[in-house]
Image (cartoon, rainbow, N blue to C red):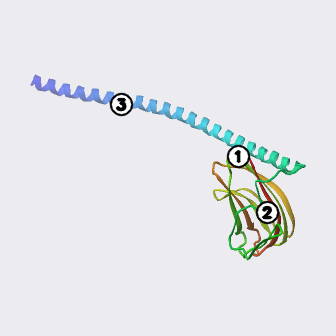
Amino acid sequence: MPCSGTRRGWKAGRTVSRRGHDVGGSVVSSGVLASRLKDATVVIVAATGLWFFWSQYSYLSGLSWWYDSVQQLHARAVVPQPDYDLMTLPWQMIHPRTFEIAQGRLRIITNDEAFGYQALANVKTNGASAADIQFDIDVESGGVTVGLLQAGQWIAANSATQAGKFTDWNSAQLGYRRTLTIAIANDNPAGQSRLTVKALRVFLRR
């Protein structure tokens, strides 16, 4: 009997000891977890703030670069020799009704797709970090968008939505890709547009 009672007491004590150890361990683990979560929250908040600051800085820096570039383009007294022009660009027609180059001018009658591409020209960037485009267009009817693309995305675009003289410059910083696309697209919700491109020049900046 005494042995049996002692064995029962030992078991009971063992059980209590385990429970006490488990409870204490849970409290310690919860405290450590809470501390780590707090530290992680601080890191996440700091990283988010840094990302927001950098994104805003990057946006403003890019906007400032674009504004300065366009201002310099407009202020040029003498236009340098372009890397590509209307006659040397390797145009690919994208279903315009008319695409005629004659006497240094390009006449386009678009198809009826409201905002569809009419002509594209893919060129090598040759390591350039930026590109400028200058054009002189007479829009007879409808509208037109002229600009630059990389990876299928517009990086610079100018649009005219009514008839008249359409002359302007634009600039864009180039990505790491080795090619650049010059695009002429329709910009007329009603359908067909008619225009004559009198000049189109592309300048690559290294």
Disc 2 or disc 3, which is closer to the eye? Answer: 2
Furthest-left residue in view?
1
Dot 2 crowding, Cα within 10 Å, few <14, some 14–19, many 20+: some
Task: Give the residue displayed 74% in from the left and 65% down from the top.
Answer: 184
Distance Cα–Cα, label 2 vs label 3? 71 Å
Helix, strand or loop for disc 1: loop
Residue that label 2 marks: 159
Q: Amino acid at mark 1?
A: Ser
Task: Give the residue displayed 88% in from the left and 50% down from the top.
Answer: 78
**Residue 15 picture location, percent across and down:** 25, 30
Q: Residue 129 got which mark?
A: 1
Front position in the image: 203 or 75: 203
Residue that label 3 marks: 23
Q: Amino acid at mark 3?
A: Val
Relative to 8, residue 122 above or below: below
Do callouts 2 and 3 mark residues in contact (Cβ within 8 Å)?
Answer: no
Task: Give the residue displayed 77% in from the left and 71% down from the top.
Answer: 188
Dot 1 crowding, Cα within 10 Å, few <14, some 14–19, many 20+: some
Disc 2 or disc 1, which is closer to the eye? Answer: 1
Distance Cα–Cα, label 2 vs label 1? 24 Å
Task: Give the residue displayed 75% in from the left and 61% down from the top.
Answer: 88
**Residue 70 picture location, percent across and down:** 82, 49
Locate residue 23: give its quadrant. top left
Which is nearer the N-term, disc 1 or disc 3?
3
Relative to 51, residue 166 above or below: below
Q: Is residue 29 left or right of residue 134?
A: left
Locate residue 12: give its quadrant. top left
